[in-house]
Image: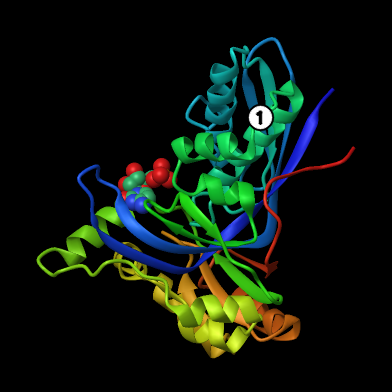
Amino acid sequence: MSVTVRVPAKVNVRLSVGAARPDGFHDLANVFLAVGLYDEVTVAPAETLRITCSGPDAAQVPLDATNLAARAATALAERYGISPDVHLHIAKDIPVAGGMAGGSADGAAALVACDALWSTGASRDELLAICAELGSDVPFSLIGGAALGVGRGERLTPIEVGGTFHWVFAVADGGLSTPAVYAEFDRLTAGTPVPAPTAPPALLDALRKGDTAGLADALGNDLQPAALSLRPSLADTLAAGTAAGALAALVSGSGPTTAFLAADAEAARKVADALAASGTCRGVRTAVSPAPGATVREP
Ligand code: C5P
């Protein structure tokens, strides 16, 4: 018997970052939007907890106890007094260490998969609380769709999405460490007051209406200057996508993946082709939003 859960990547359509808190985290107003690039996590009983991973970027995925999928299985097992003796297999399609919450997605998927395998009867709120302990972005991977995250990004209010958005993602060479990008944010903002984080009503309205032009006008990422400071070449990728007709271009989360919003599927294809030909990135993906959260796949 095995259970497979499909889980989406995300893009932050507004990542508003406040000052560093005493616990080292930053208060956020983080508008998440799930995009249709998916990992699949399959869980099956085994002699002992082990993880395997397949996919083009599999070699970059840590297969030890630090993997969020393993941590999720262990956290749920501890809570219910179960032994986490499972084989977790991650079929990875989400760019690794790219600012698209690939690791968080695997954590949420493993949690939902183990919950189904072990029939724990945990409530959705209990699962969300475990997600929040695993990482700031993990609860959103569970719910998908679109949501405003406050606190460190883990306290979610779902947002209705009234249409389809067309995205192009440029995958950069190598990853960027999320703590390093936040530390660079702190360095760049040192000595200046950092305003309280907010999500602009115009952005939430654009999501609700499915208004691509409105979303393009209101997108923003306060971590972008920090990501560009650590990886200046990302400016060339952003410029290449904009020149090819993207309505908006931004760094996805803490990067280094860059995201481009296109008017429709055809415009997205043009942007994708131009980015692929530009030599400014390692790979290009297109995807649409919104996408559902972690979901058990029927056999
Ligand atoms: O919560 P998560 O483990 O994903 O966070 C990874 C790192 O990102 C944290 O250790 C911290 O450096 C940074 N972070 C932050 N403020 C947040 C979320 C993450 O400073 N709200």
Q: Is residue 209 above or below residue 67?
A: below
**147 lies above or below 129:** below
Q: Which residue is mark 1?
A: 52
Question: The N terminus is located in which quarter?
Answer: top right
- Label 1 CA crowd tier, 10 Å (few <14, some 14–19, many 20+): some
Residue 135: % across, % down = 45, 41
User: In front: 201, or 168?
Assistant: 201
Q: Looking at numbered disc 1 in the image, what kind of residue is underneath it?
A: Thr
Label 1 residue SS: strand
Q: Residue furthest left?
A: 191
- Identify the residue shown where x is 63% and y is 13%: 82
Above or below: residue 274 compared with residue 130: below
Q: Is residue 35 left or right of residue 99?
A: right
User: Which quadrant of the view contains residue 232?
Assistant: bottom left
Q: How many marks?
A: 1
Q: Is residue 277 visible?
A: no
Q: Is residue 162 left or right of residue 229?
A: right
- Residue 163 in picture, x, y percent from top left: 71, 77
| Residue 199 quadrant | bottom left
Name the quarter where the C terminus is drawn.
top right
Q: Is residue 66 left or right of residue 24?
A: right
Image spot of residue 212 (x, y percent):
62, 84
As drawn, is 188 to the left or to the right of 251?
left
Q: Nearer the viewer, residue 77 or 274?
A: 77
Q: Residue at x 32, y 63 (%)?
A: 17
The residue at 40%/53% (across/down) is 176
| Residue 149 x %, y % | 46, 57
